[in-house]
Image (cartoon, rainbow, N blue to C red):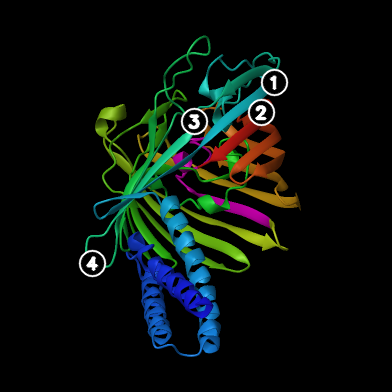
Amino acid sequence: MAGISFRHALRLALLGATGLASVPAAAQQTDGEQSLEERLSRLEQMVGTLIERLDRQEDLDPILTETRALRQEQAALAAQVKDVATAQDRDGFSVGDTQVTLGGYVKLDALSLRTSGGQLPDGSILRDFLIPGTIPVGGNASGWDTDFSARQTRVVLKTATDVGTGQPLASHIEVDFMVTDGGDERVSNSYTPRLRQAYLTYGDWLFGQTWSTFQNVGALPESMDFIGVTPGTVFDRQPMIRYTSGGFQVALEQPETTVTTPAGGRLLAGDDTLPDIVVRYNHGGDWGSISAAGILRSLNIADDDFGTGGHSALGYGISLAGRIDVGERDDLRFMATAGDGLGRYIGINIVNDAAIDLSGDLDPIFTWSGFASYRHFWAEGLRTTVAGSYFRADNPVLLTGDQVTDESWNAFANLVWSPAPKLDVGIEFMHAQRQLEDGRSGALEKVQVSTRYAF
C-alpha cells in the first residue's frame, strides 16, 4: 500500500507540472518568447512519458532521477516565465496590435540666483534655467532670488503598432510645462502643457518634431540646470523628415531665418523657401561614441521686410560631439561647433543668423562654440560632473551695433546621489557670463537643488 501511495503522489506531482504550460499564454507574441513555448511543449511530453512508465509499474529509481531533473527544469522555466511577465508589465499594455507605454519624470527644482548687471523679473522663465543671451548687462546688481519650480516635469507617450510588414509603426509624443504661460507664484503655479516632441518612425524613416539632427543630445552632460552647458551647445527641436542607415543620417528640417535689424532688434522674416539640410555620421564602440554633423542653410528675407527687395545668403556649419568612457564608469563629453549663419542653433539663439547691410543684403554671422565635461563616480550612485562651455560671435558691428552679445561662457559643478533606482537628488553651483560688443559684461551665479524621479 505504501508503494502504491507513493506512486500515486508522484503521479499527481507530475500532472501538476504540466500546468506550467498554460502560464505564458500572453507570452506567445514575440520571437524571444517562442522558445519558451517550445520548451514547455517538450516538458509536457516528458511528463506524459514518465506517467506512462509509472502506470506500467516500472522501477521507481530511474523515474525519481528523471523527476528531479524535470523539477529543476520546471523551476527554471517558471523563473523565465516570471521574467517575461515582468518585462511585459514594464513595456506597457496592448490595444489590439498596438503596444502602448507611458514614461517621463517628475522633477522639483529649488534654486537661488543673483546677477551683477540687473534684476531678472519675478516669475520669469529666465530664472528657471540659463539663457545666455538674456543675462542682464549694465544695471544694478541683484540680491539672491529664490524660486521653486516643478515645470520641467515631463510625460512621454509611446506606441508601436504591428502593421504586418515585420517593422513596427511607432510614435513618440512628449510634453512638459517649460516656457509656457499659466499660474503665478502666488496661488496656483498652474503652467500650461507644451509640445516638446511628436514624431512617428517606420523602418529607417522619421517624420515629425524632435531634436535637430545637427545636435548630439547624447553628448550633453548631467546637470541640474535644464541644459547646463547652454553657451557651447547646439540646441534645437523642430519638425523634420529624417532617413537613417546604420550610422549615417540625412534630414530635411524646418527653416527659419533670424535677422538683426539696423536698430539692433531681432526679425523673424518667415520668408524661407528651402529646408535646412543636415548630414550626420555616428560611430560608437565599447569606448563610447562620437558624431560628426554638417548643415547647409538658405537664409532669406523678402522685399516686405525692409523694402529693399528679396535677398538670400548661404549658411553652413559643422559640429563634432561625443562621449568617451574613462575607466569603468567615468566619462568625458564634448562638443565643438563652428559656422556661418548658425545663430538660432547655438545656445538658444544667443545671436541671430545674419545682419542686413546698407544695400539690403544679408551678411551671415560667424560663430564658434563648444563645451567639455567630466563625470566621476565617487561610489555606486554618487557622482560629480564638472563642465565648462564657451561661445563667440564675429558680429559685423557696423550692421548690428555694439549692444549685441560678443561672447558668453559658463561653468558648473554638481554632486548627484541616487538613493534608489530612477531617483536622483543633486546640488549644483553655476557661474555664467555675457559680454557685449561694447565691452560691458554681466554675470549670473546660481545654486540649484533638484530632485527627479523617472518612471
| Real-space Cα separation, disc 1 to disc 2, in angstroms | 15 Å
**Residue 171 in picture, x, y percent from top left:** 32, 49
Q: Amino acid at mark 3?
A: Thr
**Residue 400 in picture, x, y percent from top left:** 49, 30
Write down the residue under mark 3. Answer: 400
Q: Nearer the viewer, mark 1 or mark 2?
A: 1
Check if residue 63 falls in the magenta segment: no
Query: Considering depth in this image, is 6 or 340 the residue closer to the camera?
Result: 6
| Real-space Cα separation, disc 4 to disc 1, in angstroms | 60 Å
Question: Is 9 situated left or right of 26 in this image?
Answer: right
* Vertical order, 288 against 428 (above or below): below
Check if residue 342 falls in the magenta segment: yes
Residues marked 2 and 3 touching at CB (< 8 Å): no
Residue 116 is labelled as 1
* Vertical order, 454 against 133 (above or below): below
Question: Is 400 situated left or right of 406 in this image?
Answer: left
Going from N to C along the chain, the mark reached first, 4 or 1, is 1
